[in-house]
Amino acid sequence: MRAIDGTSLVLPGWVSAHSHAFQYGLRGHTQRAPGETGTFWSWREAMFSLADSLTPESLAAVSRDAFRALYRSGVRCVGEFHYVHHQRGGGAYAQRTLLSDVVIEAALAEGLRVTLLRVAYARSSHGRPPEGAQRRFCDGDVDDVLRDLDALRSRWGADARVRVGVAPHSVRAVPREWLGPLNEYATRYSLPFHMHVAEVIGEVESCLAEHGRRPVELLSEAGVLGERFVAVHATNLEPHEARLLGEARAFACLCPTTERDLGDGLADIAALREAGVRLCVGIDSHVVTDPVEEMRALETHERLRLRRRVTYAGAEGRTLAEQLLVEGSAHGALACGWDAAVRGRETAWDADTVVDLESAPLRGVAPERALDALVFSGHPGCVRR
């Protein structure tokens, strides 16, 4: 952190470690219940409808809009969890990675670094083949996924602004037998390994029904937990699952604005911290484009859950605000495979977000309280563009 002329504060660039850029196109379309109430599953149907309508051109346009909003809000790197791979009906494009390339190009055009997390998706759920839009997400076998990863690494490996990662969608959408080859590939090339984990109760129940194990138990037995593993959401875990993640030095990527929009529930962040799980944040569905809100919600959601204030004192001598900023920057960068760019024991990395100390939430705040004001009162308007 450094100040410039007393009017600007330069911070390590913020990272959205989990994003579905195309979902930016859902804004305003899912806030009316289709019946008496809405659920994650009714929202998912609207999302599938949008996904099924995408062309390479429309995906490029909505991705640029989403990434432009991210950049203007202070994000400098994005982990794009990308699963719309194929044409309508499931047929591959002549260039199989066309839509992945489109998303990468959109991020670069808007000034972001990007980790393209190539999603593996095989089925609707246990015993159910893909339906409708899901056919655009699915591959015939795990070797198709590995070939696409090879192609992406070959095309983008020389670009210093791009990383590639491996992302089995979830235990619901990927059979256990795919996890080994995907993890072996990620390990061989030191790639990040991201996966939706226990976002909703239904996922936990289906995992128990199929495997007799909860999601993190299954992933631990499959040998995929480790320092490159990122459990996205981790909303509905038991304490022993948090401990399994912590023992592996894994990450949990929380996406608070999306999780509350979808009614997923509140993650037990205290249990994750106590277990030693490294936290990062993601914009996810882009229902709100405000990385500061994602960071502060790691604390404010705990205040709601625990019914008390200032639930965490920070780590390694940091204030709470400093800790949340580390989780919103360096931890996200590490989770997305930018290890070489991170400096100073996970406290900074070499891309900057410039904050305007004269913006309304920060004007008149004492310098030693500026970070507290930014994290707990700030918004995208505090970022110099």
Image (tube, helix red, strand yellow):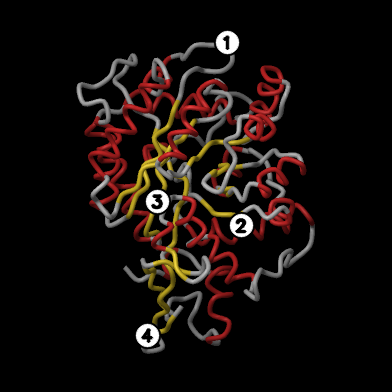
Q: Are marks 2 and 4 in contact (CB under 8 Å)?
A: no
As measured in the structure, the alpha-carbon distance from the residue carrying label 2 to the one carrying label 3 is 19 Å
The spot of residue 234 in percent (x, y) is 63, 42
Are the two marked residues, 1 and 3, in contact with CB atoms closer than 8 angstroms? no
Residue 254 appears in the rendering: no
- Tell which circle, 4 or 1, labels the residue nearer the N-terminal end: 4
Q: Amino acid at mark 2?
A: Ala
Upstream in sequence: badge 2 or badge 3 = 3
**Which of disc 3 and disc 4 is earlier in sequence?**
4
Compute the Cα span from label 2 to label 4.
28 Å
Cα–Cα span, label 4 and label 3: 26 Å
Instruction: Tell which of 289 and 134 is nearer to you.
Output: 134
Are circles 4 and 1 on residues that touch, CB within 8 Å?
no
| Residue 243 drawn above or below residue 210 | below
Residue visible at 52% across and 72% down?
374
Please indicate whether residue 201 sits to the left or right of residue 178 in the image: right
Q: Earlier in the sequence, mark 1 or mark 3?
A: 3
Query: N-terminal of the two: label 1 or label 2?
Result: 1
Residue labelled with disc 1: 127
Q: Nearer the viewer, residue 113 or 189?
A: 189
SS category of the residue bearing label 2: helix
Nearer-N-terminus badge (2/4):
4
Residue 4 got which mark? Answer: 4
Where residue 294 sits, quadrant-wise, is bottom right
Which label was assigned to residue 297? Answer: 2
The residue singled out by tag 3 in the image is 78
Name which residue type carries label 3: Val
Which of the two discs, 2 and 3, sits closer to the camera? Answer: 3
Q: Secondary structure at mark 4?
A: strand
SS for callout 1: loop
